[in-house]
Amino acid sequence: MRIWPGRPNPLGATWDGHGVNFALYSRNAEGVTLCLFDEDGKETQRIPLRERTDFVWHVYLPDVRPGQRYGYRVAGPYEPQAGHRFNDAKLLLDPYARAITRGVRWSDRLFGYRVGDPAEDLAKDDRNSASDTAKCIVVDPAFTWADDRPPATPWNRTVIYEVHVKGMTARHPGIAPEHRGTYLGMAQEPVLAHLQSLGVTAVELLPVQRSISERRLVERGLTNYWGYNPIGFFSPDPRFSSEGARTLVNEFKTMMKAMHRVGIEVILDVVFNHTGEGDHLGPTLFLKGIDNHSYYHLDPGDPRFYRDVTGTGNTVNAGHPRVVQLIMDCLRYWAQEMHVDGFRFDLAAALVTDPEKADFGAGLFGAVLQDPVLAKLKLIAEPWHPGANGYQLGAFPAGWAEWNGRYRDCVRRFWRGDAGQVPELASRLAGSADVFGPGGRRTYASVNFVTAHDGFTLEDLVSFEHKHNEANGEDNRDGSEDNLSRNWGAEGPTESVHVHRMRRRMKRNLLATLVLSQGVRMLLGGDELGRTQDGNNNAYCQDNGMSWFDWDLTPEEVELVEFVRLLTATLRGNPILRRRSFFTGAPGPDGEKDLTWVRPDGSEMTDAEWNDGGNHILGMLISGRASDEVDDFGRPVFGETLLALFNGGTRSRRFVLPDRGAPGVWQELINTARPGTRTPRADSVTLVAHSVILLRRLEGQAANALAPSSP
């Protein structure tokens, strides 16, 4: 085999049509060897990399072609006390690998130290790990994208559907068995049609970066189903490939192309804050063996140990320039080569120079906003990490949206019946200006959600008051104890007609509140189908029917799907529900406020109502002229005046409809106590306990066409 010097850029294995350039960064290595393998996993050749430029080791092999399997062995000091864990007996994955095979087989050979030795990780292990670890694959990026274009849906029109690739498709009867649970399954017409019918504009996929299941899970017969345990940032996970690692890149691209064809964006949940290599007693799979001292935050007082603000054993050093480069290169790859539309950053608050100091204006976050490719994408932060000073909601710079956990908690408390929630609920309904306004941001900085992958599903939120995680094998110790849920009369499954009726209404209440709130709406995939995890609020390791969608729907579940469709149709039909700027509450040129908070007698809320902890009723009146949308020529686009009424209490109340001055009629669009009604109203409505009503104001000929009924 011919061996040429190659180039230090780009990093990774790059096929240029003639051969492959290999480049790997390691500042502290003393030697790097490229190892080639055949398709059966047999090592065929070792090639020492003689060239090093700016700490990048590189070589060019003109006789290598796409499909070649490879890995690295990196030599250097094995001195854990100094933060160095080099061990060239261990085969390492390329951090820039575009494709990685299946096949990590847990054994003691995967560890850089002798497992079980009294000296723990200080005793180096010299056994070859190649037979037990995955291999990288050289990829040909060629793909026929044709006229693929990003939908580029404006933030204020975005409806996100958070979903797991396998979970949505594993049991879908309309998908061929060989495509269920795969990227190609997500590209099938039944899935696309369902998403379109729900009014979804973007799917947010749980991690599809190459991940690994922890040894403790595998030994219990479980897997890390969610995938928050990466060992490869660039490679799609081969778990979701229908034909294996060789085709997984093209299968992912096929999914992207199909989604874009029907106007749906794809946002990836990306995990850069930690890796699957764990703590000092974890395996040596890639970064730990390539240059532990550069890639991870180490304890400055004892570099043998990691600074762990992620709860996973390690924290990636996003303050290191080469680590920032790795993340930036990765994001640009997914955006440019894979056509991804945005990213949700897991534990984003850990991705700063110092994870215990909140500085989001520089480092990685500043680099992303200055990048001409990435700054145009949808960027979403999970604004916390489990370490000190970890909750940073509202602290991210303009250009970023954030998962709004305060929204979730407030809405759950209100509908659970907690006292004193009305003032905060008003803030959350109006877009959380108190959280995001001070930083000069807009309504769409807030990604509103009631449920997400982590926690109860919507069905379980109204069916369980305690977690039931026994299936995880941790004696129900894992998962949050604070679920802010209510079972409405019985814990879990019940035959009670009354309990079932209340649960169905509460699901409608929670969904209606979400869609009627300013900001970006995010639905948890499967909630519209009544998906349950049997009370498990941490189903990260349940790759089975507990996590997969059940498409065999009952009449009640079909009704819930139709209700979600009604909600999103209402959102699309009225621009005042999609404001970009925050309400002012000040009178406009016509003397009318854009937003008025209304009490049951039809007049404006006073301090007495705001300060009444026992008040569970709130009316939200939005003027039809409160829209801030414009058409292509800059002309304002107005909507219909809407009145949303929320009753989180136990008593029904007569609610007087506000007098608008001009003759007209109020028409019900949504009533969670009586789904499917569109009743015209003259002067009042009965706001049933635990219910939401949405009405629109009709005047002129539209009002004359309706005959108002008595309240």
Image (cartoon, grey):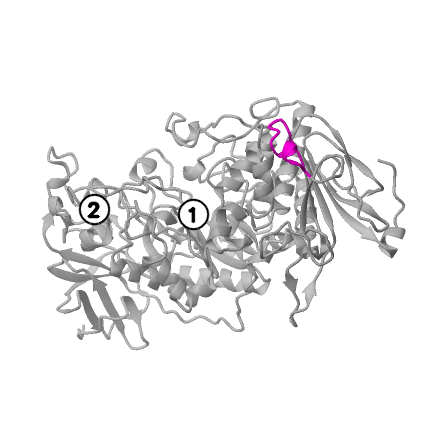
Q: Residue shown at 74%/30% (left/top)?
A: 653
**Residue 478 visible (yes or no):** yes
Location of residue 381 in the rendering, given as x and y in whole percent from the top left corner:
43, 51
User: Within 10 angstroms of label 2, few (less than 14), some, or many (20 or more) residues?
Assistant: many
Displayed quadrant of residue 647: top right
Whether residue 688 sits left or right of residue 194 in the image: it is right
Say which amino acid is labelled 1.
Answer: Glu
Whether residue 301 sits left or right of residue 267 in the image: it is left
Residue on which disc 2 sits = 298
Whether residue 376 sits left or right of residue 194 in the image: it is left
Q: Is residue 609 magenta?
A: yes
Displayed quadrant of residue 509: top right
Up the image or down, 537 lies above or below 350; here it is above
Location of residue 134 in the rendering, given as x and y in whole percent from the top left corner:
28, 52
Up the image or down, 602 lies above or below 203; here it is above
Q: Residue furthest bottom?
A: 18
Residue on which disc 1 sits = 382
In space, the residues marked 2 and 1 are separated at their CA atoms by 23 Å
Q: Is residue 317 magenta?
A: no
Could you say which is closer to the camera, residue 564 or residue 516? Answer: 516
**Residue 330 visible (yes or no):** no
Location of residue 689 in the rendering, given as x and y in whole percent from the top left corner:
70, 29
Up the image or down, 111 lies above or below 146; here it is above
User: Within 10 angstroms of label 1, few (less than 14), some, or many (20 or more) residues?
Assistant: many
Displayed quadrant of residue 633: bottom right
N-term-proximal mark, 2 vs 1:
2
SS at badge 1: loop
Q: Residue shown at 69%/63% (left/top)?
A: 637
Q: Quadrant of the N terminus?
A: bottom left
Could you say which is closer to the camera, residue 501 or residue 168? Answer: 501
Q: Residue shown at 13%/45% (left/top)?
A: 80
Magenta segment: 605-618
